[in-house]
Image: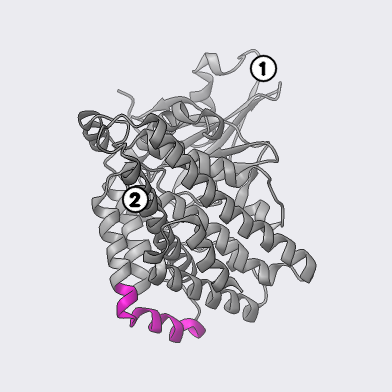
Amino acid sequence: MTQYSVFDSEKALDYVASLAPLFNLQAPLNCYEFGDGNLNLVFRVSDSTGRSIILKQALPYARCVGESWPLTLDRARIEASVLKLHGVICPETTVKVLHQNNQLALTILEDLGQLAILRTALNNSETFPKLSKDIATHLATTSFNYSDFVLTPAKKKSLVSEFLNPELCAITEELFFDDPYHQHERNNFPITLTERVNALRSNTHLRLEVAKLKAKFLSSPQTLLHGDVHTGSIFVDANTTKVIDPEFGFFGPIGFDLGSFVGNLLLNYCAQQARIESLPQRRQMQTYLISCVAECLLTFEQSWKDLANAHSLDVTLRDPVYIEYFVGSIIQDAVGYCGTELIRRTIGLAHVADIDNIEDEQARLAVAQHTLFIGEQLILNSSSCTSQKQTMQLLLSLLN
């Protein structure tokens, strides 16, 4: 068994060189570390012919905090395994795993360097015609195929056990559902938002709805989730959409991934109010973003119903009346989780560049006020949103 050690560029290069099938070893290899994420080391290894791969290694702690926040190395196994299972179902939208070493907590992946990180691209006002349908189809197809509608009870329970991810789930549970609604040293917001934050925390109805969302997150192993679907974990160009980084993967409520993605589109929508000075250009970008939300929800809703009606194996669950009810409950959950994403990205530990990189302090504060308002209203009104149509009616009333 290989003993774990933290890689540097030289170790990464030596390791990749030992895997002869990946490269023509007659060509010299180059390696550099370029990761800027919160948790892991990321290296690019390339040869002189232009072939390259990504080597990702988990650290035994959160990189963004340091050794004071220890983390399990098993998250590397979970990430690679989620990618492999999701890749079987959706190969076109899942980054390909080339090699996995659980002892060293590392994964070698196809290099997507020719694509753009979605968050960066949206912040640069770039648009992608296939994005919303690709993500909706990916989320619908993967979530359906690893649900009770398809898996036998024995197979489902076996996979739930394989993908227990308590340490990373605890991060989600705390950052989404706990910290923003209480005083905690991890929270991060300007003092000028204090009154607004205190109003959120004193809203008993809001706290009740957040508690319901957390309870479902804790106790509803509906499918194998990605667990962290945001615009920084998606690579894109005009014709391609690829999902990466599912190290938070576990069996949880289907609406969580969908809500997280939609929440990040809405964060960017709000941020564009301060990012794009030209009114026509700003309206054009915001129209694109809200159309992405509408198309994503509609595609997900219809795809899930089509899959369930055509391919459900469970004799009871494939009843059309239950399918209609179940998909409605997914949308309802997604709206609530979308709201928690907006709030936690505004006042919690992990912010987004969409907002934080707005230079004008007053403009940035106005955006933060807006995201908190929308997040709060989505959580409070999620029970009335069991379809794309109802959700869009609510959203448009909040954005106008």
Q: Principal SS element in the magenta part?
A: helix
**Number of the front mark, 2 or 1:** 2
Q: Is residue 125 above or below residue 143?
A: below
Q: In which image quadrant can residue 26 be found?
A: top right
Q: Is residue 225 above or below residue 104?
A: below
Mark found first going from the N terminus, 2 or 1: 1
Disc 1 secondary structure class: loop
Q: Is residue 276 left or right of residue 195?
A: right
**Residue 179 visible in the displayed image:** yes
Q: At 70% across and 25% down in the image, what residue appears?
A: 50
State the extent of the magenta-drawn residues as a range: 191-207
Q: Is residue 329 left or right of residue 304?
A: left
> Badge 2 local density, few (<14 within 10 Å), some, or many (20+)?
few
Where residue 131 is drawn, which disc sits there? none
Which residue lies under the disc numbered 1?
Answer: 27
Q: How many marks?
A: 2
Identified by mark 1, the residue type is Ala
**Marks 2 and 1 close (CB-CB < 8 Å):** no
Identified by mark 2, the residue type is Tyr
* Quadrant that contains the N terminus: top left
Q: At 26% across and 32% down in the image, what residue appears?
A: 315
* Quadrant that contains the C terminus: bottom right
Percent of width and height locating residue 264:
53, 58
Which residue lies under the disc numbered 2?
Answer: 325
Percent of width and height locating residue 249:
37, 43
**Residue 6 visible in the displayed image:** no
Disc 2 secondary structure class: helix
- Look at the image and say whether residue 116 sits in the magenta stretch: no
Percent of width and height locating residue 87:
47, 29
